[in-house]
Amino acid sequence: MKRKMTGICGCGLALAALVLTACSGEKIEGAWVEPVPGMEGMTQGVRLEEGGKASSINMATLQYETWQREGDRLILSGRSLGNGQTIAFSDTLQIEKLTADRLTLRRGSLTIAYQRQE
């Protein structure tokens, strides 16, 4: 029984550390970019401004407009443009890690590792 409790406590501590890392006191506002696959030297991403305004960085067909944070979730909304049509979207992502210069988001099996743009 003691061994089982130690395992449960260890899992609880690991989960608490993950939540504390994701919900650190770091500000999420700023410009976040990642490399564009197959295009060396190019970056793409999102700019999160105070007041919930968002904008895309180097992504003409995906236009972010708003954002909001709910605990360890980031909700991005905007418009997807293509093939002569515009589609509104809202995307909920899990904040895996947030530091002064790194933002890691996850949705299902997709992980996006952003770096703060100066």
Image (cartoon, rainbow, N blue to C red):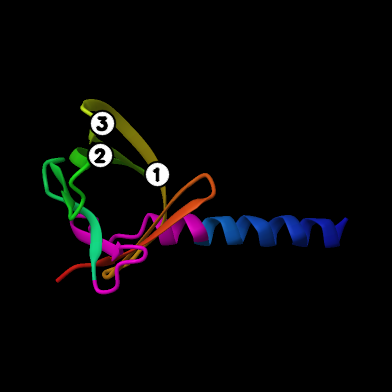
Mark earlier in primary sequence (1, 3): 3
Query: Within the magenta stretch, is there residue 40?
Result: yes
Q: Which residues are magenta?
A: 18-41
Residue 4 vertical position relative to residue 52 in the rendered view, above or below: below
For mark 3, does the 10 Å Cα neighbourhood hold few (<14), some (14 to 19), or many (20 or more) residues?
Answer: few
Q: Secondary structure at mark 2?
A: strand
Question: Could you tell me the amino acid type at mark 2?
Answer: Gln
Mark earlier in primary sequence (2, 1): 2
In front of the other: label 2 or label 1? 1
Give the image quarter of residue 22. Answer: bottom left
Query: Within the magenta stretch, is there residue 81?
Result: no
Q: Nearer the viewer, residue 5 or 28?
A: 28
Q: Position of residue 57 (x, y in %)?
A: 17, 54
Q: Secondary structure at mark 1?
A: strand
Q: Nearer the viewer, residue 36 or 95?
A: 36
Most extreme residue toward the bottom is 41
In front of the other: label 1 or label 3? 3
| Residue topped by disc 2 | 68
Query: Which mark, by number, is residue 83?
Result: 3
> How far, Cα to Cα, is label 2 from label 3?
29 Å
Q: Position of residue 108 (x, y in %)?
A: 52, 44
Mark earlier in primary sequence (2, 3): 2
Query: Which mark, by number, is residue 49?
Result: none
| Residue topped by disc 1 | 93
Question: Could you tell whether 3 is left or right of 20 in the image?
Answer: right
> How far, Cα to Cα, is label 1 from label 3?
26 Å
Q: Secondary structure at mark 3?
A: loop
For mark 2, does the 10 Å Cα neighbourhood hold few (<14), some (14 to 19), or many (20 or more) residues?
Answer: some
Residue 26 vertical position relative to residue 83 in the rendered view, above or below: below
Give the image quarter of residue 92. Answer: top left
Q: What residue is drawn where x is 76% and y is 60%?
A: 7
Question: Could you tell me the amino acid type at mark 1?
Answer: Leu
